[in-house]
Amino acid sequence: MFLYQLHEMGRAWLAPMTYWADAAAKMYSSHGSWLSGVPNAPRIAAGYELLYRLGKDYSKPEFRIKSVRIDEREYPVVEREELRKPFCRLLRFKRYSDELAGVGELKDDPVVLVVAPLSGHHATLLRDTVRTLLRGHKVYITDWTDARMVPLSEGPFHLDDYIDYVQEFIRLIGARNLHVISVCQPTVPVLAAISLMAARGEETPLSMTMMGGPIDTRQSPTQVNDLAYRRPISWFENNLVQPVPANYPGRGRRVYPGFLQHMGFVAMNPERHAMSHVEFYEHLVQGDLEDAQSHREFYDEYNAVLDLAGEYYLDTVRIVFQEHRLPLGTWSVRGEPVQPAKIGRTALLTIEGELDDISGAGQTQAAHQLCTGIAKTHRQHMTVEGAGHYGIFSGRRWRTQVYPVVREFIRKYQEHPIRK
């Protein structure tokens, strides 16, 4: 029960040392400092900066999408908050251009809602996804709120509430001309949300693209799946769900702390992370500033984590990873059965990474066995060779292999929607 408090005490104890290490790194590396001329100054500065980065607190990053490059020209992008809910903001990235150039946000650009994962990292993890989509789409994204920043008076947040949020965002944007992209964890609640809307006879999005998600974790179970399945739900509740300390707005709220999730991320590949930090040190010593900056940018994002509402986390572990309610057809949301077979007017694209060690092969593709109401001609699957989990939505493979497929799939159903 006091694990979070102990973590905060440790952070407070380390804070003076990290500030000192940061200052020392700058003193030994700045050209205007006499300390930069002492013997082995580059190694001393590199050591201090590494110490600083290992001990510092990482805050939520910004999207920093101020422009998008199209045909060798830069066009400004404005980030707007369209709707604020207690646990999420709906953001819109609006692209502007010179009307005379004939390039910019045109009326026929497809509208895309990117549902970001709520599984430990901030939505900014999808920065590359959003920036690439902005080349030819009107883009919205869910920006989930760190649960420790939500006052207890706002009430709990369950997996059912997540599904309610997704449906509300779809209705607000307008399902009739919308394409939904879900990345990793949200593939399950997004499929549930659209299934429920279809069962009620509501308008559903033109297409849904599901990338690297745990639709059926019985397929090629990974280390993540095994951990969630082996332990009883009481173990997760008693050992991992902690009350937020008094120094945050959400004090007293029970959460799955982000620092525990981060420890789990690192524990999956400890050697790789250790080697990355060693290489960062060497880059600094050798003056390889470009590679050193790439390291900083990656870990600024990777080390910035958020807390998950405890009830949402436990719901997800139980419903998705332990009881497999979606693929078994036993899931109900607020008394309504989740029936993906009811979806008929929304095209389906599933994408998996060949080397994904978080959502194994076949877990996302399992959506095709559930969405039998969608004609086979309106369903498509892609396996990205050589790609891990992050490679299907960020980086070179995303931009050169995955995005062209997503773009053409969306364009196809934008121009020729399924209408029954």
Image (cartoon, helix red, strand yellow):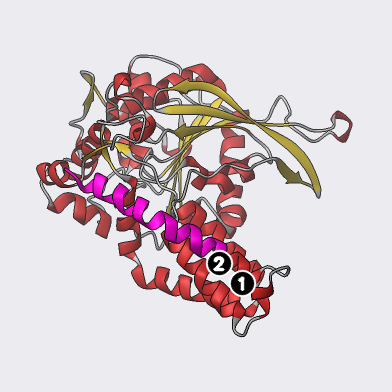
Residue pictured at 48% horizontal, 32% vertical: 142
Q: Amino acid at mark 2?
A: Ala
Q: Is residue 154 above or below residue 56?
A: above
Is 374 within the magenta?
no
Q: Amino acid at mark 1?
A: Tyr
Q: Position of residue 155 (x, y in %)?
A: 28, 21
User: Could you tell me which quadrant the N terminus lies in?
Assistant: top left
Judge from the rendering whether residue 246 lies leftward or rightward of residue 375; answer left or right: left
Q: Are marks 1 and 2 in contact (CB under 8 Å)?
A: yes
Residue 283 in sight: yes
Left or right of residue 137: residue 174: left
Residue 64 location, quadrant: top right
Q: State which region is magenta.
A: 1-23
Task: List x then y, in percent, for residue 72.
Answer: 81, 50
The percent position of residue 392, horizontal first and vertical second, equals 49, 53
Q: Quadrant of residue 288?
A: bottom right
The image's mark for residue 24 is: 2
Instruction: Tell me the number on the disc at residue 28.
Output: 1
The prevailing secondary structure element of the residues shown in magenta is helix
Q: Is residue 361 visible?
A: no
